Image: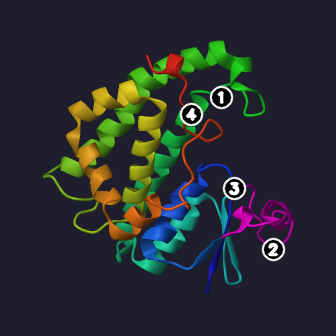
Amino acid sequence: MAYELFYWPQIQGRGEFVRLALEEAGADYVDVARRDGGTELLMAALEVGEHPSFAPPFLKAGELTIGQVSTILLYLGEQHGLAPRTEPGRLWVQQLQLTIADLVTEAHDSHHPIASSLYYEDQKPEALRRAADFVETRIPKFLGYFARMLSNPEPRPYLTGERVTYADLSLFQVIEGLRYAFPNTMHQIETEYPVLGQLRDRVAARPNIAAYLASERRIPFNQGGIFRHYPELDQ
């Protein structure tokens, strides 16, 4: 069975968290909207089925249609060994993923604090204020938490121990995205919490992930995605 991933073709966005899990699993999947006529198929798929997704990304797995990044990853984690086998372990990884989702939302809102329908230039004064707090308090709080999860009570390769989970892949993506959007801030934070860069490098070196990152399937960061680099916001 080949999975069908439905997400916008020009950006990494939230779809990238799903792509990373599929790539790490070595799963057979089609990135539907990146094919000819794919965006039209994506839009049509939002209107059909018993359980349609509110918005992309969503994943078709046989007769299942699964929306929301965390729910998709919960499913893929169980199907492909990217989550612990025990219920407490699965719930813990999902809790970590939902915390990452909160951070991703705040990263987006740092440059679009008023409305997604407005251009950045239409809300620049508000973005400057929002990003200042994001840089000063929110990024350190979130990443300090994840650094603690990687080092307390003792250092470990991944968030839950020796085995990679989808939460580790997502944390890798967040670190990459924040490095792109807020390089000055991330240099300071990673100097204080070296375990974050070590986790990033460990994930990037995994064979399937390394092959993906070097391929054309990996869309570069750009100013249309969640993580956007505006130098004035990275003070």
Q: Kindly state the secondary structure of the residue where label 3 is placed.
A: loop
Q: Earlier in the sequence, mark 1 or mark 4?
A: 1
Q: What residue does disc 4 label?
A: 228
Q: Determine which of the numbered discs, if any, sits on residue 9 in the image.
A: 3
Mark 1 or mark 3: which comes first in sequence? 3
Foreground: 31 or 35?
35
Does 110 sit left or right of 186 as displayed? Answer: right
Disc marking residue 112: 1
Relative to 194, 106 lies left or right = right
Using the rendered view, name the quadrant where residue 235 is placed: top left
The amino acid type of the residue labelled 3 equals: Pro
Q: Amino acid at mark 1?
A: His
Pointer 1 with pointer 4, Cβ within 8 A: no
Q: Residue at x 40, y 50 (%)?
A: 171
Label 2 sits on residue: 50
Q: CA distance from mark 3 to mark 2?
A: 25 Å
Where is residue 41 shown, x and y percent of the image? 82, 67
